[in-house]
Image (spheres, grey):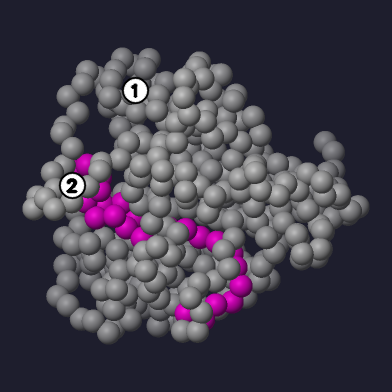
């Protein structure tokens, strides 16, 4: 047992602190985790860089009917191969929820196939491992903030097999924000990324968006409570959606006939808004940071979006910054707040 006065290690993650004026931040990473995992599963180095963790289905513009991908008829894998795939999903899910959320949509898809994997699943696993080998040692950077929770919510309609939809959420800590006077709050590293398949078949894109709002607001409740208990009072949490109809329903500016499932979600979210827990506001999809996690994308989009969620190595590195005695996770000052994100991420992966 030893006491780390620099606060450089927390819950399995490396914390690299910088205390320079106007450049204060902490970088959270898990060095060599990917390399060790690839060695464990004996995956060779890819012959060329892979920038797409999972294949996407290109839209057919102008077509009257958009067809679903054909059913997977490839052979079922052996028990040993099935166990290997389950181990790969588990090992990388831990890493993705800790420091690299860009892997989560692919792992969500692969996780739904791990109970009965096929030869096609093995090919998808190989592509995912190539992506992991190409993009090793991800880093999330957190900067000082007012510790106000913000949520971006999104959903992709009928994007999953068996007519299911996928909900996504991007949670981060930033400053106070008034949707009526400001476009967006200052961004920060994610403290939680939600990627879930909605169990029920949604009747419309609006119903899928309502399901996404419902799940994200439910996830936000314990985060709000944790922040309040830690001494950071929370105003109504701003929740961004890019669906104007869902926004209108929640804010009571639109009324429509609803199914029972949608009726329950509508009333739950609206009741929480009336209780002062949330403010639901609309912004266009290009400003919604949860959109990336709701569906699969081409390689060019992944390359473009990774810097929005991760700190890229070609940016300013805090390795030149010096530590001050007594600072870090144990400091009683402002920086003691930042490990909340690492703490929350660790709770969510255990």
- In the rendered image, residue 164 lying in the magenta stretch gets the answer yes
Describe residue 86's horizontal placement relative to residue 164 as left or right: right
Looking at the image, residue 143 sits to the left or right of residue 93; the answer is right
Range drawn in magenta:
154-179
Q: Does 288 sit above or below residue 90?
A: below
Q: Is residue 281 magenta?
A: no
Secondary element type, mark 2? loop
Identity of the residue drawn at 35% across and 52% down: 294
**Residue found at the far left of this picture:** 64
Is there any visible trace of residue 272 in the rendered image? Answer: no
Give how far across and how far down residue 328 sits, in percent.
80, 53
Element assignment for label 1 = helix
Classify residue 224 by image quadrant: bottom right
Q: Is residue 205 left or right of residue 309?
A: left
Please tell me the numbered disc located at residue 122: 1
**Which quarter of the rendered picture does the N terminus lie within?**
top right
| Vertical placement of residue 107 versus 234, above or below | above
Image quadrant in which you'd find residue 244 = bottom left
Q: Estimate the spatial distance between the alpha carbons at disc 1 and disc 2, rounded to whole Å.
A: 27 Å
Residue shown at 48% from the left, 38% from the top:
93
Sequence-first tag of 1 and 2: 2
Report the front residue among 68 and 46. Answer: 46
- Which label is found at residue 60? 2
Report if residue 332 is visible in the image: yes
């Amino acid at each position: 047992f030893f006491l780390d006065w620099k606060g450089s290690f927390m819950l399995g993650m490396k914390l690299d602190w910088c205390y320079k004026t106007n450049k204060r931040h902490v970088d959270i990473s898990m060095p060599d985790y990917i390399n060790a995992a690839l060695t464990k599963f004996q995956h060779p180095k890819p012959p060329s860089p892979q920038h797409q963790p999972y294949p996407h289905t290109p839209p057919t513009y102008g077509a009257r009917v958009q067809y679903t991908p054909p059913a997977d008829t490839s052979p079922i894998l052996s028990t040993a191969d099935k166990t290997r795939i389950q181990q790969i999903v588990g090992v990388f899910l831990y890493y993705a929820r800790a420091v690299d959320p860009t892997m989560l949509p692919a792992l969500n898809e692969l996780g739904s196939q791990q109970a009965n994997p096929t030869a096609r699943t093995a090919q998808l696993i190989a592509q995912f491992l190539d992506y992991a080998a190409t993009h090793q040692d991800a880093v999330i950077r957190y900067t000082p903030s007012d510790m106000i929770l913000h949520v971006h919510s999104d959903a992709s309609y009928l994007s999953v097999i068996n007519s299911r939809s996928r909900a996504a959420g991007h949670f981060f800590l930033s400053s106070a924000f008034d949707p009526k006077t400001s476009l967006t709050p200052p961004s920060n590293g994610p403290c939680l990324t939600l990627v879930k398949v909605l169990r029920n078949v949604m009747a419309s894109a609006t119903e899928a968006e309502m399901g996404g709002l419902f799940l994200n607001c439910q996830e936000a409740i314990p985060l709000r409570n944790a922040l309040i208990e830690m001494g950071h009072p929370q105003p109504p949490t701003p929740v961004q959606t890019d669906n104007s109809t869902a926004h209108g329903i929640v804010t009571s500016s639109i009324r429509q006939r609803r199914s029972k499932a949608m009726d329950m979600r509508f009333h739950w979210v609206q009741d929480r808004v009336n209780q002062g827990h949330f403010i639901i506001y609309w912004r266009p999809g290009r400003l919604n940071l949860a959109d990336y996690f709701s569906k699969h994308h081409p390689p060019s989009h992944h390359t473009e979006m990774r810097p929005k969620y991760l700190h890229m190595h070609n940016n300013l590195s805090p390795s030149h910054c010096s530590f001050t005695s007594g600072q870090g996770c144990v400091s009683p000052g402002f920086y003691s707040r930042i490990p909340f994100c690492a703490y929350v991420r660790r709770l969510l992966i255990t």
